Image (spheres, helix red, strand yellow):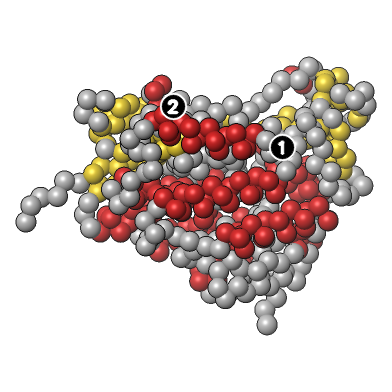
Amino acid sequence: MANITKKRIAIIGAGPCGLSQLIAFKQAEKEQRIELICFERQAEWGGLWQYTALTGIDPCGELIHSSMYRHLWTNGPKEMLEYVDYPFEKHFGRAVSSYPPRAIMYDYIIGRATAADIHKFIRFRTAVRFVNFDVNTKQFHVTIQDLLNEKILEHLTFDHVIVATGHYTLPNVPNFEGISKFPGRVLHSHDYRGADEFVDKNILIIGGSYSAEDIGIQCYKFGARSITISYRSFPMNFKWPDNIKEVPMLIRMEGHTAYFKDGTSVDNIDCIILCTGYRHNHSYMAEPLRLYCSGNLFIPSNLYKGIFWSPELRLAYLGMQNQTYSLNMFDIQAALVRDVFLGYVKLPDDDDEKKREEDISQWQAREQVIAANDHEGFTDLQTDYIRDIVSCCDQNTVPKFDLERAKAGFYKFFNDKREDFITFRDQTFTSIFPPYNEAPPCQIKWTKNMDDSIEGYLSSIKTT
């Protein structure tokens, strides 16, 4: 029997995207066609869904990766992100509500990865320091560091590299006049670890998107005295409780007083939480391979099909879009990467970079005409994007789900939030998979449900 040359494939990151990619390659690994290594600088897998009370720097001197905080419950229905091959009911042996807490989500994601037996491919506490590409040999050279032993290993070679590090780690920190002299506490949402720290406090939140809305309502739930949300472009305009209000952008701080763009001010601010987003950070990639984004765009520049590095298709970036869909979209992206890298399919514009750039531009042009607060418009865009990448995959193996049902579910979710932001997590959704069962509700309303442990949560689910 002739020797089969294995392709060496590196995956950077063992969060949800990296785990999806490892699972996608599992079948090929059994066929002994690839050598697969995933590098993860944290001690455990799960990426963003890992919780740690630490902030700043971890025990190995690395920036804390996760922005996860205590008491987080999903801010979107689980039905719209469920894995096709691994439903929640299969994992927990029972139905669960549409908005589970963080511990449930982490257990679900890791449960699937454990069942897939992919832990053996991951090198933990290993940081990727540099990735370059040799145009002559068509191979990537990767420099890694063993963080526990402080050893640098240079020039590991790979045929393909997949970047799956996410983009919710490096905080975007704007400056405001007087904030450096503010006598209270200032933190970015990356370092926020729980609303119980802010009981009976007057909080100023700067930002107008998901972090601002969720941290604001979490602080309300745990008893903050007042919450002022300062937005840059437009208010979220939810039906807030009486002690939450929205104001235009902060201009300056003078002591404990905040002054805003419309001339108003708020006194007695105790703490400021910057919910101002994150920066894409791929500084370990050589310049010709490095993805730059000014923000978390839906279709980033240079990524063909939102995944493949257009100048060099042997490189892929997963999950770089701002996300309506998440876990199930990562699975589909990973399926396409597998199919392309192993030669199961050929990309439509595989041999023409100019056409790839035209394809990227068409998606970006569509994005640019969507209003910044048009959530339904972005959902339509990302639904069509997923439909496009599904069409490029091997149709026998790509995970598929009812995109129209999923889109309708997102529409309901957006409407629930507009109707009553306090109670939207108490609503239930129907599965997007047959037999399309409706999730059971919790016996305890979200605002009163302080037990977010797996045991406490499961005991609160109504069953028939």
Which residue position is annotated with label 2?
290
Q: Nearer the viewer, mark 1 or mark 2?
A: 1
Category of crowding for the residue at label 2, using alpha-carbon neighbours closer than 10 angstroms: few (below 14), some (14–19), many (at least 20): some
Q: Amino acid at mark 1?
A: Ala
Q: Position of residue 121 (x, y in %)?
A: 32, 50
Category of crowding for the residue at label 1, using alpha-carbon neighbours closer than 10 angstroms: few (below 14), some (14–19), many (at least 20): few
Distance of label 1 from label 2 (alpha carbons): 26 Å
Which residue in the rendered view is the most extreme toward the left?
1
Which residue in the rendered view is the most extreme toward the bottom?
464
Side (left or right) of 373 relative to 42:
right
Disc 1, SS: loop
Disc 2, SS: loop
Side (left or right) of 121 relative to 381:
left
- Work out whether residue 209 or residue 298 is closer to the camera in this orientation and state it: 298
Q: Amino acid at mark 2?
A: Arg
Side (left or right) of 181 relative to 299:
right
Quarter of the picture containing the N terminus is bottom left
Is any part of residue 42 visible from this angle? no
Give the label on residue 372, or none: 1
- Work out whether residue 336 or residue 97 is closer to the camera in this orientation and state it: 336
Please name the residue shown 25% across and 42% down the image: 8
